[in-house]
Amino acid sequence: MSAIATNKPAKSRRRPRWLSNTALLLGIVISVAFLAIALLSAFYLPHNPNVPRIPDRLLPAGSPGYVLGTDVLGRDILSQLMVGARTSLLVGAGGALISLIIGTVAGLSAAAFGRIADETISRGADILLSIPGIVTALVLAATIGSGALTTVLALSAFFTPSFTRVIRSAAMSVLQEDFITAARLYGRPTWFILLRHILPNVAGVIIVQFTLFFAAGILTEAGLSYLGVGVTRPSISWGMMLNEAQQQVGISSPLAMWPGLAIVTVVLGLNLLGDGLRDVLDPRLSRRGA
């Protein structure tokens, strides 16, 4: 008998979902570039961004020694953008991180510790949401003065209630699952269920919300600095650069173009990163794609 050779098709390796997510990949590239520039600014700057050089004022982009030109006082635009990236990183990430910590604790507590805790935390979040963020920033600026710390505190007060509500909603969904009922039947305490079962299952939501609030924090900080209640010199932010450039728009439009372009690019990148992470980490979307 002759053996019949059968050619079995080779099993194709399944491509990771994140590699096929264009939005996520683009968001990663922009976010990594933003982080690299922000970190580089702590060790290297082409020029001192706060030292005026009147003979070099309003030089166009591409001038010798000034890649992006200079402002009305002869200060290097590229150096200011690099320092502004570091400020945006510290302020945006700081506000989002504080909101993440407080909002996660409050949201999990509201979901797991009964009706009284839920009503108290939820109504407190509603009260804070009813206060406009700009009002909070103005009050803090009048109390402790404008600056990076004021902006971080204002962002934290503005974002924490929203973070709390999102985490509470996600935790309430997890609490309806059968494995939570089984854990309670085994006599597991509430704190153990929160840390062992609920927190890992809402970790994806926390990561996604952090990236989105990070982007919103950068945008909000730019708006507050533009209005004069955020970051001020000698610190530098992109919103402050827009504020200083508004009077020179008719003379030198790139003064406003460069910080505006930086804000749009970074905020877009972080939003793409958040949307991509949501698509990859959401188990319902994973099952649907499969």
Image: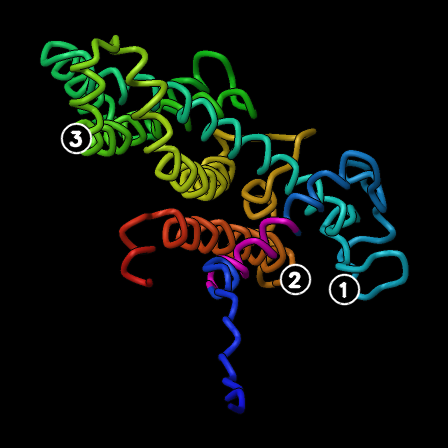
Q: Earlier in the sequence, mark 1 or mark 2?
A: 1
Task: Give the camera-side residue of 274 and 201.
Answer: 201
Q: Which residue is mark 3?
A: 178
From the viewer's perspective, tell me whether residue 2 is left or right of residue 277: right
- Confirm whether the magenta stretch covers residue 103: no
The image shows residue 244, relative to residue 162, as above or below, that is: below
From the viewer's perspective, tell me whether residue 41 is left or right of residue 261: right
How many numbered marks have been drawn onto this rendered protein structure?
A: 3
Q: Is residue 56 visible?
A: yes
> Alpha-carbon distance for marks 3 and 1?
65 Å
SS of the residue under disc 2: loop
Characterize the magenta stretch by its predominant secondary structure.
Answer: helix
Residue at 49% of width from left, 41% of height from top? 218
Q: Which mark is residue 252?
A: 2
Which range of residues does the magenta coloring cover? 21-32
Q: Nearer the viewer, mark 3 or mark 2?
A: 3
Q: Which mark is residue 40?
A: none
Residue at 51% of width from left, 71% of height from top? 12
Three-letter amino acid code at disc 3?
Asp
Task: Give the camera-side residue of 200 and 212.
Answer: 200
The image shows residue 271, relative to residue 91, as above or below, that is: below
Q: Nearer the viewer, mark 1 or mark 2?
A: 1
Three-letter amino acid code at disc 2?
Ser
Q: Residues within 10 Å of mark 2 (few under 14, many from 20)?
A: some
Q: Earlier in the sequence, mark 3 or mark 1?
A: 1
SS of the residue under disc 1: loop
Three-letter amino acid code at disc 1?
Pro
- Tell me the quarter of the picture where residue 249 sits: bottom right
Q: Which residue is mark 1?
A: 60
Residue at 49% of width from left, 21% of height from top? 150
Question: What is the residue that sits farthest to the bottom in this orientation?
Answer: 2
From the viewer's perspective, tell me whether residue 176 is left or right of residue 96: left
